[in-house]
Amino acid sequence: MTRVIRYSVVVVLATCCLVTPAFAAQGLPTAKPEDVGVSSDKVKELSEYMQGLVDDGKIAGGVTMMARQGKVVHLEAVGMADREAKVPMQTDSIFRIASMTKPITSVAVMMLWEQGKLKLDDPVSKYIDEFKNPKVLLSVDPWKTEPAKVEIKIRHLLTHTSGLGYSFTPNVAALHDELDILTGVATSSEPVADTVKRLTEIPLIFEPGSAWNYGMSIDVLGRIVEVVSKKSLGRFFEDEIFRPLSMIDTHFTIPDEKVPRLVAGYVPVETCLREVRPGERLKEIMVRDEAGFAGTMTLTSDYPYSPSNVAESGGAGLSSTANDYMQFCQMLLNGGELNDHRLLEKDTVAMMTSNQIDDLHVGASDMKFGFGFAILRDDEPVHPQLRSSYAWGGYWCTSFRISPRGDWIVITMAQVAGRPRDEKYDSLAAEAIEK
């Protein structure tokens, strides 16, 4: 079958939607920026910067949102939600948030920990038998493994120190491909329970606890949530997190009536973007040498609503809105509580958002990692408002940062596969704090 690929330069058709009390009433209250010590001019640069990315053809459109002291001071949409269909971006557009699913899964695990239903030092094999007797990869040529000295524990999964990889992880990428292990950003007819069992056929890339590597640890945690709670991951999220936080537009499977609000997915093609059409399966080459990538990422655009997709990936499967995810972030910033609903104790949130990997490094950076979040050190050579903040992003170009020091949150949402997290938004938000 010949695949017809449509290439086109992004046409700049921008629309700006300012935050209004009517919309924000579904979530946090609103405030004028200066009323909570934020510069109106500076915070406006968040959407102006995103508009510049639209103008340069790097994204089709997006949404930026900022809150301080529990009040929304900025919410704007720019560009197009669907460039080809000429659908303007809206502030309530729904985005594939990919790895921004991971912090939600991590919160679910810690809720079960608080309830005494699991322990951080429990071996994963206590919940998934196939994780017994793991092997560690010693060399590729010749292929050589040896039994791991320790089993993977829950805390190793939470911190990405398990030794599990992804389909783009050097040395084990080919095995991921051979076993057809998908990562949550592609339609899959296989339940995560089966995928996770097959994942154990791949040796670990290091001894658990000895290094940091981004991989499928949180997908495994999602399965553990199901085993412990005796609920599907989606049902647990809905009952224990989404409903209490009024996250009304966050789903593994988007209801039919909401599908028109889902933003079109794009992939970068040299100097322009190409839409990932529904049903189309792509294998994007991951070759960022500085990050150690050496494989591919399989993706489709229709997994949020396809009847064929049954995988509820705790590592990447959710779709959401900026407003919904702000609710989740504000709960964390509040120390585990929002709108009289307490999900976690303050001490638990503090533990999750502090360094849990000792002197290990997050990739090639000096960042640290907690239980689900990358953390900037208190002595990091960055704007003071960014120190001790925590953040994460998603493969489809979404991100958030939470600053306990300055009591603010910034969220950005776009839909371009593989576009790295843009730290410019974080800097702009930090610079907007006046007092």
Image (cartoon, helix red, strand yellow):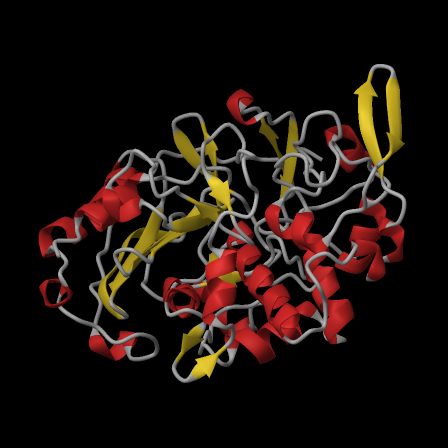
Quadrant of the image containing the N terminus = top right
At x 76% / y 75%, what residue is drawn? 230
Q: Depth check: 175 or 218 in front?
A: 218
Q: What residue appears at the point 77 percent right and 36 percent down from the top-left corner? A: 204
Q: Nearer the viewer, residue 186 or 148?
A: 148
Q: Is residue 28 left or right of residue 236?
A: left
Q: Does residue 309 appear in this view?
A: no
Q: Quadrant of residue 335?
A: bottom left
Q: Quadrant of the C terminus?
A: bottom left
Residue depicted at x 73% and y 40%: 208
Residue nearest the observer in this picture, 242 or 204: 204
- Point out residue 182 in the picture as x, y percentages from the top left corner: 71, 46
12 lies left or right of 156: left
- Residue 413 position within the rendered picture, expressed as x and y whole percent measured from the top left: 38, 52
Q: How many numbered marks are there? A: 0
| Residue 205 x %, y % | 74, 32
Q: Is residue 247 above or below residue 365?
A: below
Res. 410 in view: yes
